[in-house]
Image (tube, grey):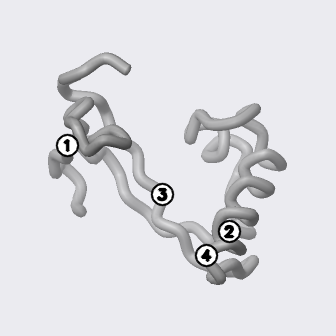
């Protein structure tokens, strides 16, 4: 994955849904996530508290959670919609 690269996003049946282009990539520690970046992810209630709870639960189930773990944060733009959800 690199800035400028294109990716096909698939649904749960592995059918293509859209094409995205990566606009930015960065590393951020779990403990350093900001309100703005949490809201940009667009999930849940868009709050930092909600983001932390959901991601802590996910990574704990995976057995990889740590307050200082590094996460890849990317921004992208939808280039083409292939199939509406």
CA–CA distance in space, label 1 to label 4: 25 Å
Secondary structure at numbered mark 2 = helix
Name the image quarter holding residue 11: top left
Q: Nearer the viewer, mark 2 or mark 4?
A: 4
Residue corresponding to mark 1: 8
Q: CA distance from mark 2 to mark 1?
A: 27 Å
In the picture of the structure, the residue carrying the numbered disc 4 is 62
Where does residue 16 sit, x and y in percent of width and height? 20, 35
Vertical comparison of 44 with 38: above or below: above
Q: Secondary structure at mark 4?
A: helix
Q: Judge from the rendering whether residue 45 lies leftward or rightward of residue 18; answer left or right.
A: right
Q: Which mark is residue 60?
A: none
The residue under label 3 is 73
Q: Earlier in the sequence, mark 1 or mark 3?
A: 1
Q: Do tag 1 and tag 4 residues touch (Cβ < 8 Å)? A: no
- Spatial separation of the CA atoms under disc 2 and disc 4: 15 Å
Q: Label 4: how many residues lie within 10 Å, few (<14), some (14-19) or many (20+)? A: few
Numbered badge on residue 30: 2
Residue shown at 30% from the left, 45% from the top: 23
Dot 3: element: strand
Neighbours of disc 2 within 10 Å: few (<14), some (14-19), many (20+): some
User: Residue 41 appears at what percent x and percent y?
Assistant: 56, 41
């Amino acid at each position: 994955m690199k800035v400028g690269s294109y990716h096909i996003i698939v649904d749960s049946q592995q059918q293509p849904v859209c094409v995205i282009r990566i606009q930015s990539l960065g590393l951020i520690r779990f403990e350093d996530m900001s309100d703005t970046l949490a809201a940009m992810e667009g999930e849940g209630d868009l709050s930092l508290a909600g983001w932390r709870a959901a991601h802590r639960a996910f990574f704990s189930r995976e057995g990889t959670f740590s307050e200082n773990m590094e996460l890849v944060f990317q921004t992208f733009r939808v280039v083409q919609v292939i199939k509406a959800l």
